[in-house]
Amino acid sequence: AQKITQTQPGMFVQEKEAVTLDCTYDTSDPSYGLFWYKQPSSGEMIFLIYQGSYDQQNATEGRYSLNFQKARKSANLVISASQLGDSAMYFCAISDRGSTLGRLYFGRGTQLTVWP
Amino acid sequence: EPEVTQTPSHQVTQMGQEVILRCVPISNHLYFYWYRQILGQKVEFLVSFYNNEISEKSEIFDDQFSVERPDGSNFTLKIRSTKLEDSAMYFCASSEWVVPDAFEYFGPGTRLTVT
């Protein structure tokens, strides 16, 4: 079974608007972490935000926030005030204690395009 | 800010040749990983490494792959006899503690092209 599902292959948003990128996950482990990474066209993987399964509050990092709904097993990324430089592929990933050193399982990604 | 570095950024090799991809993890990190991403596909785990030994490997990491930490700073991935399907972006990552208690920081990647 897929551990991470990203159902939006592509999303479009106008500059300065907010956008939500969906991510649902599947794990039976009570302890896990959820991550979002950004991959611009240059190819590198940039860590954006992290949410621990026991964290009571939703994670925020600048314009990024994570809408964590544990009962629904969803961890959507919200980008506020989109900028042209936000155009990139965005990957959701999970790490649980099912593996020895916490390998990451990635979703297929969402290609975000920000237009002026 | 400390970062993971990888060399080379792009490697072109002929099928059947050996390649070594190099990574320098963040200096105080203890846990090391290799991932790969075939063009247009998701990032896939290859192997994790701690205390000078492999901790976990995926089904992709077969006998043609090996990893090594030859000194205190480098972490290498060797592909013994490359195949066309090994063409991908290879990412090295490191973390200070075991994920999910820490984040994995990724290097910029090495794009491997096998012809």
Image (cartoon, coloured by chain):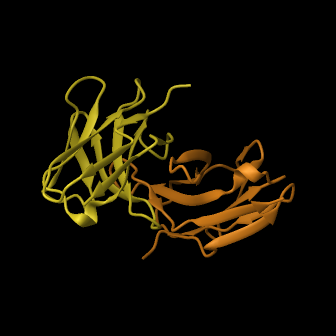
| Quadrant placement of the C terminus of chain A | bottom right
Q: How many marks?
A: 0
x then y, percent, for residue A36: 59, 53
x then y, percent, for residue B55: 25, 47
Residue visible at 31% across and 25% down in the picture: B73
Residue B64 in view in this figure: yes
x then y, percent, for residue B46: 30, 55
Residue sitting nearer the eye, B10 or B79 = B10
Residue visible at 43% across and 37% down in the picture: B95
x then y, percent, for residue A25: 55, 68
Residue visible at 46% across and 42% down in the picture: B108
The quadrant holding residue A114 is bottom right
Q: Is residue A26 left or right of residue B23?
A: right
Which chain is orange in the picture? A
| Quadrant placement of the N terminus of chain A | bottom left
Which chain is yellow in the picture? B
The quadrant holding residue B23 is top left
Instruction: Answer above or below: position of B84 versus A64.
Output: below
Instruction: Answer above or below: position of A52 versus B1.
Output: below
Q: Is residue B20 left or right of residue A85?
A: left
Q: Is residue B113 left or right of residue B63?
A: right
Residue sitting nearer the eye, A74 or A81 = A81
Residue sitting nearer the eye, A92 or A70 = A92
Residue visible at 79% across and 65% down in the picture: A13
Q: Residue furthest right?
A: A16
Residue A69 in view in this figure: no
